[in-house]
Amino acid sequence: FVITALFAHWLSTRFGGGPGYAAVLGPLFFVNQVLAAASFPVAAWLSKRIGLVNTMVYTHLPSNVCLVLIPFVSERNVYCVILLRGFLSQMDVPARESYMTGIVPRDERVACSR
């Protein structure tokens, strides 16, 4: 949550939003989290098609590229990049959990998932 607050502060400072800028950031972060949740079934489908490790790699790399691009794009495009990153950034979570469940012995899974 701290990172989101710092990110919101950076966006409002970078793009000159005043007190009313929260009306933009609130829905932006809401849609971002909805897209992150919607990416879970897509990640499951993708992992069946290309494998668990490939799903982790091929979704996390573009997500990090989007993160690097955020400071360099215009205000109009930054929201699209943020939403694209929100969709891609959590797609590795179901694949990673499934992969770890498959390789870790049953009696050690609780310690592994922490």
Image (cartoon, rainbow, N blue to C red):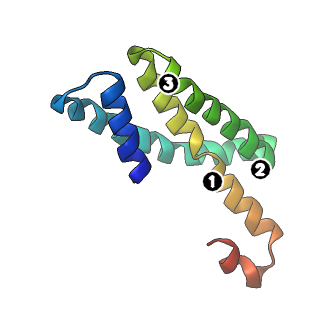
- Position of residue 66 measured from the top left corner of the image (x, y, whole percent): 58, 29
In the rendered structure, which disc, 3 or 2, sits on the residue that comes first in sequence? Answer: 2
Q: Work out which residue is located at the far left of the displayed protein and give it.
A: 19
Q: Work out which residue is located at the far front of the displayed protein and give it.
A: 13
Three-letter code for the amino acid on which mark 1 is drawn = Val
Within 10 Å of disc 2 (Cα), the crowding (few <14, some 14-19, many 20+) is: many
Q: Work out which residue is located at the far bottom of the displayed protein and give it.
A: 107
Residue at 61% from the left image edge and 35% from the top image edge: 63
Discs 3/1, front: 3
Within 10 Å of disc 1 (Cα), the crowding (few <14, some 14-19, many 20+) is: some
In front: 53, or 63?
63
Residue 102 appears left or right of 112: right
Label 1's element? helix
Residue at 80% from the left image edge and 41% from the top image edge: 50
In the rendered structure, which disc, 2 or 1, sits on the residue that comes first in sequence? Answer: 2
In front: 109, or 39?
109
**Labels 3 and 2 touching (C-beta < 8 A):** no
Q: CA distance from mark 3 to mark 2?
A: 31 Å
Label 2's element? helix
The answer to whether residue 50 is above or below residue 15 is below
Residue 49 appears left or right of 67: right
Within 10 Å of disc 3 (Cα), the crowding (few <14, some 14-19, many 20+) is: few
Q: CA distance from mark 3 to mark 1?
A: 25 Å
Which of the labelled discs sits on residue 71, or is there none?
3
The answer to whether residue 107 is above or below residue 34 is below
Q: Which residue is mark 2?
A: 52
Quarter of the image for residue 14 reads: top left
- Position of residue 96 measured from the top left corner of the image (x, y, whole percent): 70, 56
Q: Which residue is mark 1?
A: 93
Three-letter code for the amino acid on which mark 3 is drawn = Pro
Label 3's element? helix
